């Protein structure tokens, strides 16, 4: 008699595997001693953020490194920012480096919302941007240029395809770093690349020695439409006016309007000029095809199983019974094969992408504006006036010039860089996103025991002469 087919167990296992809820999307509860050891040297304003980063672990590690690296950078905690951004770049380059090992690590089958966050191309590029700014502040122009070049490379990656890199901010800063290191021929190449993307912004002049970067607006927002990802602009457009005063001649002052170097929202919503909304459609279509293949194969498996287990309705001769059993055995094997194909296709379709990943770097800015100037060392600070789209003044801040080596850098931002919510958007399930955040109290140390007084040896005293 033909063996009972095992196709049903295959389908059940595939269904269970595709529908399971991963614990990686939850937060853990680190031991209080580990929490306080980790938070000991962190800024007070960011303690709850770092606590959440520790609780969320590797799945959101790069995202939290990005968010907290930027917040630390804005607070002037450069060493902490370096550590966080370096850690983020290690995670990014494990998947998005220009080598064979990283290419093998990139895959389409991992469900978007479950896999470790590495960011969209614009987010990865901005991680390199902030790391490059830290190098600029330290006067390390060669590493600064390499970091900006790395950001340009990240803009070229788009899933398994590569599109024309058009992140104009990166070649502009590459050229500035080369200019500050004294390599004018290399700077000319970089500025040529920048000019091919941005035809309007003025290039640095030979004697310019101070770079001013001004960030305005709030981060692009990711929303999902099933498996497709949509990007929305979240705020209005501010402009900035930069001015300075000669300390020896206070009446002499100069000012200039910052020019747009990069629109981060445009980078988030396009890739090489191509609308981002359609980028994921290929994966969505592939998912639909795999799902359809799975359905057809499973239907075929059911039909084959019915044939393999059907009982005769009339008496059979020996030859007829042997022929039927051979046919049923073949049907059983076909059914198992179709069940495997169908189950795996359904599992693969589910794993490709059941929901777009809507986690995003929420304390980024919307635009980067800037200018370069030739300023004497006696000018130690600049004033940056943020203005509304209508031209009214919103805020004026004074920013010191950070000089190192040949050049100086000024970085200003409108609004706080500290994320409002310690949890990044959609970084955990909705019920966890709104749950309270309580840092556990330090465990009380046991009180030291008092030393017991030595007991007098009365017997020896009594027996002594």
Image (cartoon, rainbow, N blue to C red):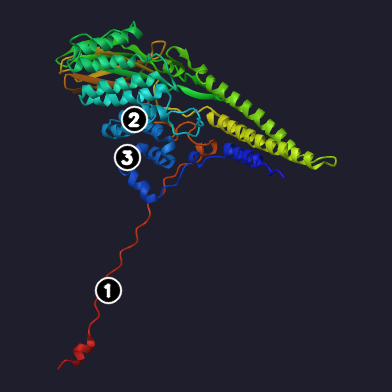
Determine whether label 3 and label 2 are within 8 Å by CB: no
Instruction: Say above or below: 332 vs 285.
Output: below
Q: Mark 2 points at which residue?
A: 89
Task: Please state the horizontal and vertical placement of residue 73, each as a whole percent of the image.
Answer: 31, 29
Q: Mark 3 points at which residue?
A: 42
In this rendering, does residue 373 appear at all? no
The foreground one among 165 and 27 is 165
Task: Please state the horizontal and vertical placement of residue 170, each as a whole percent of the image.
Answer: 32, 17
- In the shown orientation, is residue 290 left or right of residue 164? right
Q: Residue at x 34, y 39 (%)?
A: 44
**Residue lying farthest to the top in this orientation:** 199
Q: Which numbered disc flags the more N-terminal residue, 2 or 1?
A: 2
Task: Please state the horizontal and vertical placement of residue 400, each as a whole percent of the image.
Answer: 23, 23
Q: Is mark 1 on a helix, strand or loop?
A: loop
Q: Is mark 2 on a helix, strand or loop?
A: helix
**Which quadrant is home to the C terminus?**
bottom left
Instruction: Say above or below: 355 vs 260.
Output: below
The foreground one among 248 and 321 is 321
Q: Which numbered disc flags the more N-terminal residue, 1 or 3?
A: 3
Q: Which numbered disc flags the more N-terminal residue, 3 or 2?
A: 3
- In the shown orientation, is residue 228 left or right of residue 318? left
Disc 3/disc 2 C-alpha distance (Å): 20 Å
Using a 10 Å C-alpha cutoff, classify the residue at mark 3 as few (fewer than 14 neighbours), some (14 to 19) or many (20 or more). Answer: some
Q: Mark 1 points at which residue?
A: 452
- In the shown orientation, is residue 77 left or right of residue 376? right
Question: Which label lies toward us, 3 or 2?
Answer: 2
Disc 2/disc 1 C-alpha distance (Å): 57 Å
């Amino acid at each position: 008699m033909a063996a009972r087919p095992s196709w049903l167990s295959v389908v059940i296992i595939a269904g269970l595997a595709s529908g399971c809820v991963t614990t990686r999307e939850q937060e853990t509860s680190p031991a209080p001693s580990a929490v306080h050891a980790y938070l000991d040297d962190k800024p007070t304003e960011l303690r709850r953020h770092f606590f959440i980063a520790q609780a969320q672990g590797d799945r959101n590690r790069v995202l939290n490194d990005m968010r907290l690296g930027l917040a630390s950078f804005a607070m002037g905690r450069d060493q902490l920012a370096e550590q966080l951004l370096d850690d983020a770049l290690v995670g990014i380059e494990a998947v998005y480096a220009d080598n064979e090992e990283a290419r093998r690590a990139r895959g389409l089958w991992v469900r978007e919302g479950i896999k470790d966050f590495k960011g969209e191309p614009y987010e990865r590029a901005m991680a390199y941007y902030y790391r490059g700014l830290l190098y600029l502040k330290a006067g390390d122009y060669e590493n600064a240029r390499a970091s900006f070049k790395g950001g340009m490379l990240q803009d070229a990656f788009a899933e398994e395809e590569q599109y024309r890199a058009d992140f104009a901010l990166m070649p502009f800063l590459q050229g500035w770093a080369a200019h500050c290191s004294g390599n004018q021929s290399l700077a000319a190449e970089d500025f040529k690349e920048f000019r091919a993307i941005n035809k309007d912004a003025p290039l640095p002049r030979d004697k310019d020695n101070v770079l001013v970067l001004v960030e305005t607006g709030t981060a692009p927002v990711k929303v999902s439409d099933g498996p497709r990802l949509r990007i929305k602009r979240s705020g209005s457009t501010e402009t900035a006016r930069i001015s300075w005063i000669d300390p020896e001649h206070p009446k002499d002052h100069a000012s200039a309007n910052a020019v747009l170097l990069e629109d981060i929202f445009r980078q988030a919503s396009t890739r090489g000029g191509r609308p981002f909304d359609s980028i994921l459609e290929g994966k969505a279509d592939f998912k639909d095809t795999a799902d359809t293949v799975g359905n057809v194969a499973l239907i075929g498996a059911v039909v084959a199983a019915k044939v393999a287990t059907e009982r005769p309705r009339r008496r059979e001769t020996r030859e007829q019974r042997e022929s039927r059993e051979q046919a049923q055995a073949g049907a059983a094997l076909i059914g198992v094969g179709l069940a495997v194909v169908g189950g795996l296709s359904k599992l693969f379709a589910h794993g490709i992408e059941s929901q777009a990943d809507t986690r995003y770097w929420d304390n980024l800015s919307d635009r980067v504006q800037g200018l370069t100037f030739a300023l004497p060392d006696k000018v130690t600070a600049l004033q940056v006036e943020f203005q509304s789209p209508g031209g009214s003044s919103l805020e004026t801040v004074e920013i010191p010039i950070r000089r190192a080596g040949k050049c100086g850098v000024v970085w200003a931002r409108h609004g706080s860089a500290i994320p409002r919510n310690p949890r990044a958007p959609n970084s955990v399930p909705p019920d966890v996103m709104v749950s309270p955040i309580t840092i556990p109290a330090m465990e009380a140390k046991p009180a030291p025991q008092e030393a017991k007084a030595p007991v007098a040896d009365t017997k020896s005293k009594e027996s002594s002469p």
